[in-house]
Amino acid sequence: PRWEDTASSSVIVAWGQPPPGARAKYADGVMRWLALDVGKARVGVALCDAQETVITPLPPLPSAQLLERVGALVQEYGVEGIVIGVPVTRAGMSRGEVRVRDAMARLRPLGLPIEGEDERGTTAAAEALLRQTGVPRWRWRERLDSLAAQVILESFLERRRRGGPASPGPR
């Protein structure tokens, strides 16, 4: 396992090994990614299609059941990689690192590549989206975490499309 804090890029974390035969796809092709916004009580979840073009927020998961519930999503949707939002301050310093490390360690047995993506501003972006679409404030709690995961996945996929800084993880 490896934990790297690289303030010079938006990629913060990478661990895990892609399944045999998946290395070329991981490096060069499109994949179905699952994004997680890890919180104390809930984990926001978003999924992209196999072409990395459409992102769908899914219902949030209870943090205590992370491995079991993510494992079920991996099987159900054919997920090939996981992106986890890493909390970073504006100065590039990590915060909430223990919770993210714990989540990554718990997901490692799935055998999928796990990438980290800077999650700065994702909650604010999700709140703005809820406000713009007219969702009543009393419904925000059930949607906010997964919309933040959607924003994390959008950022990650955009960086991949641009050929942004590569992850220091498996290839």
Image (spheres, rainbow, N blue to C red):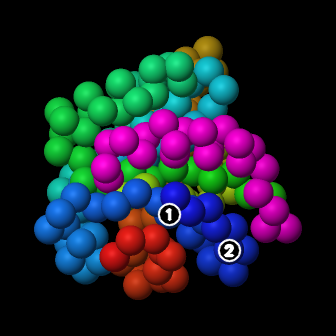
Q: Position of residue 64 (x, y in %)?
A: 53, 19
Q: Nearer the viewer, residue 58 or 81?
A: 81
Q: Nearer the viewer, residue 55 or 12?
A: 12
Q: Nearer the viewer, residue 63 or 107?
A: 107
Q: Position of residue 81 (x, y in %)?
A: 32, 55
Q: Magenta stretch mostly in which secondary structure? A: helix
Left or right position of 85 against 60: right
Residue 163 in sight from this viewpoint? yes
Q: Residue at x 50, y 63 (%)?
A: 14
Q: Is residue 96 magenta?
A: yes
Q: Is residue 94 magenta?
A: yes
Q: Residue at x 56, y 62 (%)?
A: 2
Q: Residues within 10 Å of mark 2 (few under 14, many from 20)?
A: some
Residue 135 in sight from this viewpoint? no
Segment tinted magenta in the rendering: 91-112
| Residue under label 1 | 14
The quarter of the picture where residue 118 lies is: bottom right
The quarter of the picture where residue 170 lies is: bottom left
| Residue under label 2 | 6
Q: Nearer the viewer, residue 30 or 16?
A: 16
Q: Identify the residue at the far top of this view.
A: 138
Q: Residues within 10 Å of mark 1 (few under 14, many from 20)?
A: many
Instruction: Check disc 1 and give the amino acid type.
Output: Ala
Tag 1's secondary structure? strand
Count of numbered marks = 2
Q: Residue at x 64, y 67 (%)?
A: 4
Left or right position of 60 against 58: right
Tag 2's secondary structure? loop
Q: Identify the residue at the far left of this view.
A: 21
Left or right position of 64 against 58: right
